[in-house]
Amino acid sequence: MHQHDFAALGLFITGPTYVRDEVKQAALLPEFGHRDTENKKRFAPIMANLKALAGLPANTDYQVVIYNGSGSTTMESSIRSLVAQDDVVLNVSVGAFGDLYHKMAVVNGKKARQLSFEPGRAMDMEQLEKTLQEVAPQVVTITHNETSSGVVNDIVAACALIRAHGALPLVDGVSIFGGAPSRISTARPTIYSTSTQKSLGLPAGFGIAFIGPDAVAKAEKVEFRGYSSDILAQLGCASKMQTLTTPNCTLANQMFVQLDSIVNREGVLNRFARHEKMRDMVHAWVEKLDGFELFAQEGARSPTLTAVRCPQDMTVNKLKALKATMRVKGYLFDSGYGKLNDALAAQGRAILFRIGHMGDITMEMLGEYLENLEQALEAR
């Protein structure tokens, strides 16, 4: 047997996240054929529990699709399938992952425009409305929870505004789904994209899409949707509780066990409440630290991760040293989103680190981590 020097670290980054032992053990459940009757035994409960976690009724007009890949796979599928050749797509960004949605539109040859807000700030509805009037887009992409900065947006208000201007709203919910209400039933996005490795507490490997009825009508009018990125092809398989391409059967087994635990053991509302308590714990911890402060604007702070603004004397190299110190303590520390910190440093502004508090992390685990991190910060 090969001996590997793999470190067992507590993950307090913003994904991948901590995976419980029960979920790890679920990887040992039997493999199955993805076109066999065994497949439905996994994916029918998976899709039903995803709807429950999304706050959608069993008879919802939203359909759930499991993509092989990640949240980015699902987001790109929404661009390929829902933005026609002559459409203008407006990509609204409050950070790096809003920028990513824009990049996807550009590299797929779409007529893309971008509205960007200052990092740490949520979408401003007045500015969004002004831009909608100026650009007159057919499609608009927005971010529910910006992973680079810890900002959460009001997608109910944003989707209503976008629809009032005759456009289809596409929502990236990658780092919040499973840790807070999705708002899908009230926001009514055309598509809501997420993935397994963030607040669901699972390994990476699947993108998840909640697809509304207007997505089907629009996709039918869009040419060159690709193969695995074709929403209509994906929906055809999803209607049979299948995936379009061969799934990671190991991850499907883990997802079956984890979603059953979330919905039927912990309870969806209890899970959301735990994430709020973890957010509040981190906020209280930051507020007592001398020279550190919360980065995201008040009223728009994520329940699943927190970005912390450092004192002015903290450098990128010092954060890297802090990461090494925390590794020795048994933790993987998140030294901030690299491109954002580089940009802030270049402007002479204070940089950030992040704390992921999502998925199956407990209050006890988080408290212990914060205690160790505080000691490391004091010793820096």
Image (cartoon, rainbow, N blue to C red):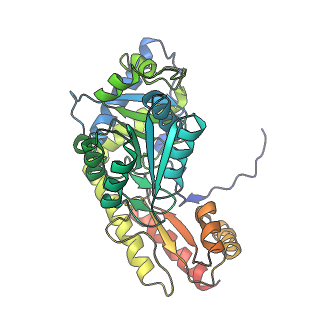
Give the vertical position of 63 relative to 15 (above or below): above
The residue sitting at the bottom extreme is 290
- On the picture, is 289 further left or further right than 161? right
Give me the residue at 66% from left, 66% from top.
Answer: 327
Give me the residue at 25% from left, 46% from top.
Answer: 160
List x then y, in percent, for residue 57: 21, 34
Quadrant where the N terminus sits is: top right
- On the picture, is 193 further left or further right than 5? left
Q: Nearer the viewer, residue 94 or 336?
A: 94
Residue 308 in sight in this render: yes
- On the picture, is 85 further left or further right than 268? right
The residue sitting at the front extreme is 134
Q: Quadrant of residue 352?
A: bottom right
Q: Quadrant of residue 364?
A: bottom left
List x then y, in percent, for residue 134: 37, 50
Give the vertical position of 238 relative to 189 (above or below): above
Give me the residue at 38% from left, 47% from top.
Answer: 177
Q: Which of 143 and 313 is in front in this view?
A: 143
Residue 172 in sight in this render: no
List x then y, in percent, for residue 129: 31, 54
Give the vertical position of 58 relative to 55 (above or below): above
The residue sitting at the top extreme is 36
Give the vertical position of 86 relative to 139 (above or below): above
